[in-house]
Image (cartoon, rainbow, N blue to C red):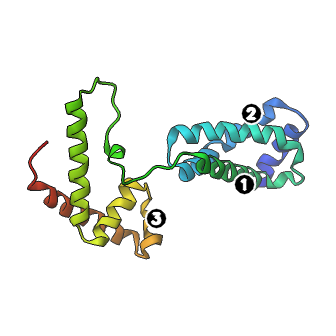
């Protein structure tokens, strides 16, 4: 977006025009949400953070000395709030079998819990039997929530190679788990 397009709106919003601020929200909401989602990897949290960002921006808009830098300023607020939220979030341990359990509203019996735990143990057992690179690839994608681009950086390989590794690792894991008795 060109500076000429949003600069008058920023100036009006700084002067106290609520509708101008509403227009800024409309223009930048998608961008803020995308940044938040990329950082938090959770749609509900990203939507909540997007609202928090605009509340913060509205409160501090008068502190913005260079209105032409509004998009960068808004991005910095988004990143800072996302980092704060991620740091305050309780840690998730990918080794916990409970992570593998789908949350549902059905009444679960102790036998259901036992079987679910058994399935998780079988999955982790299958992962442990894979080659290190296969296991790291699957864990990074499915348990750590890394994108293909992040994995490409982490493993220093092209995205196409990461896709192939994921495909191959899934097949190998399926083969590892195929001999197990269904639970």
Displayed quadrant of residue 46? top right
SS for callout 2: helix
CA–CA distance in space, label 3 to label 1 = 22 Å
Instruction: Estimate the spatial distance between the alpha carbons at disc 1 and disc 2, rounded to whole Å.
Output: 20 Å
Image location of residue 38, percent across then percent down: 54, 52
Decide: few, some or many residues near mark 1? Use Cα within 10 Å; few <14, some 14-19, many ≥20. some
Question: Where does residue 55 sit, x and y in percent of width and height?
Answer: 74, 36
Q: Which SS class for mark 1?
A: helix
Which of marks 2 and 1 precedes in the sequence? 2
* Picture coordinates of residue 162, whole percent (x, y): 35, 68
Name the residue carrying label 3.
Answer: 149
Q: Are marks 2 and 3 in contact (CB under 8 Å)?
A: no
What residue is shown with label 1? 76
**Lower position in the chain sequence, tag 3 or tag 1:** 1
Q: Nearer the viewer, mark 2 or mark 3?
A: 3
- Residue 14 left/right relative to 56: right
From the viewer's perspective, is 111 left or right of 68? left
- Please tell me which residue is depicted at 52% across the width and 37% down the height of the picture: 44
- For disc 2, the neighbor class at 10 Å (few under 14, some 14 to 19, many from 20) is some
The residue that appears at 34% across and 72% down in the rendered structure is 161
Residue 101, image quadrant? top left
51 relative to 97, above or below: above
* Circle 3 crowding by C-alpha within 10 Å: few under 14, some 14–19, many from 20: some
Q: Residue at image x 66%, y 49%?
A: 84
Compare marks 2 and 3 and give the one earlier in the sequence. 2
Q: Secondary structure at mark 3?
A: helix
Residue linked to disc 2: 22
Q: Residue 128: horizontal and vertical position, in percent?
A: 25, 63
């Amino acid at each position: 977006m060109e500076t000429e397009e949003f600069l008058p709106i920023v100036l009006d919003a700084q002067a106290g025009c609520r509708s101008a601020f509403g227009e800024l929200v409309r223009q930048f909401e998608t961008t803020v949400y995308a940044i938040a989602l990329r950082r938090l990897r959770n749609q509900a949290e990203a939507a909540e953070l997007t609202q928090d960002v605009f509340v913060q921006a509205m409160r501090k808009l008068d502190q913005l000395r260079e209105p032409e830098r509004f998009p960068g300023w808004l991005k910095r607020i988004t990143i800072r709030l996302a980092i704060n939220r991620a740091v305050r979030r309780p840690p998730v341990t990918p080794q916990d079998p409970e992570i593998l359990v789908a949350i549902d509203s059905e009444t679960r019996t102790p036998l259901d819990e036992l079987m679910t735990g058994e399935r998780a143990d079988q999955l982790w057992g299958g992962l442990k039997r894979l080659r290190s690179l296969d296991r790291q690839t699957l864990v990074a994608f499915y348990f750590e929530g890394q994108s293909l681009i992040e994995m490409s950086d982490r493993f220093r390989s092209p995205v196409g190679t990461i896709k192939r590794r994921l495909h191959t690792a899934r097949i190998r894991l399926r083969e590892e788990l195929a001999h197990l008795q269904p639970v």
